């Protein structure tokens, strides 16, 4: 049996899926809150993302045809930019950017675990690479992301570590 709970207004709301009996592990990596729904993005052993409707207090699996499932159903983070773009970390393979009716795939920034935005609307990406998984093709570290283009910043700031999980701005 698989499930989880939310604490809302001092009450727990629980989602249980008793049909799922063969999951080794599920990792909720981020939440994306909209006006009417909360999306739960997951990473490991996941068939599809999960949606919570706080008004109806109901959960359901996100339809596989939903554009968030493009390319992969494994997420490492999510972020909504000040210009309204939605960004979802795509497992080991960079980010998916949803800008109005366009989906932009950037697979040059590694495994992104966190995103922050500065006052100039520049995005900064925390990327991870421990050199243990041969599927990681790009270095981890700090990336500057502006105009939908990435720039690797570790060497500019003399950062040697490529195992960056989070940023504080």
Image (tube, rainbow, N blue to C red):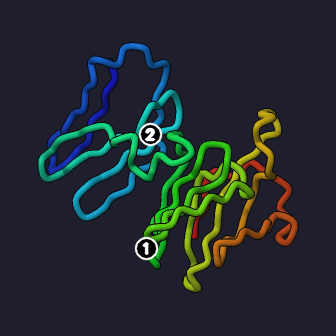
Does 79 sit above or below residue 43? below
In the image, residue 36 sits, relative to residue 4, either above or below, namely below
| Mark 1 burial class by Cα count in 10 Å: few <14, some 14-19, many 20+ | few
What's the residue at 65%, 76% (across, down)? Answer: 146
Question: Can you give x and y, in whole percent of width and height, for residue 143 in the image?
Answer: 72, 65
Q: Secondary structure at mark 1?
A: loop
Residue visible at 43% across and 53% down in the picture = 67
Q: Sort mark 2 into few (<14), some (14-19) or many (20+) by Cα contacts within 10 Å.
A: some
Name the residue that disc number 1 marks. Answer: 84
Describe residue 39's horizontal placement relative to residue 7 as left or right.
right
Vertical comparison of 7 with 47: above or below: below
User: 25 or 85, which lies in front?
Assistant: 85
Q: Residue at x 34, y 41 (%)?
A: 63
Q: Residue at x 64, y 50 (%)?
A: 165
Secondary element under disc 2, as helix, strand or loop, is: strand
Q: Of 165 and 1, which appears nearest the observer?
A: 1
- Between the residue at mark 1 and the residue at mark 2, the CA separation in whole angstroms equals 23 Å
Q: Nearer the viewer, residue 68 or 27?
A: 68
- The residue mark sitting in front, 1 or 2, is 1
Residue 148: give x, y in percent of width and height: 64, 72
Between discs 1 and 2, the one toward the N terminus: 2
Which residue in the protein does label 2 denote?
28
């Amino acid at each position: 049996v698989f499930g989880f709970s939310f604490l809302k207004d001092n009450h727990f709301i629980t989602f249980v899926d008793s049909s799922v009996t063969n999951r080794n592990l599920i990792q909720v990596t981020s939440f994306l809150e909209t006006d009417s729904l909360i999306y739960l993005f997951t990473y490991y052993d996941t068939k599809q993302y999960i949606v919570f409707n706080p008004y109806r207090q109901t959960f359901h699996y996100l339809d596989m045809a939903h554009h968030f499932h493009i390319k992969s159903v494994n997420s490492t983070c999510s972020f909504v930019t000040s210009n309204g773009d939605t960004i979802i970390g795509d497992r080991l393979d960079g980010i998916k950017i949803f800008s109005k009716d366009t989906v932009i795939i950037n697979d040059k920034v590694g495994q992104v675990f966190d995103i922050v935005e500065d006052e100039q609307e520049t995005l900064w990406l925390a990327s991870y690479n421990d050199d243990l998984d041969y599927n990681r093709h790009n270095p981890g570290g700090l990336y500057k992301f502006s105009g939908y283009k990435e720039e690797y910043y570790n060497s500019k700031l003399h950062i040697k570590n490529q195992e960056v999980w989070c940023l504080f701005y």
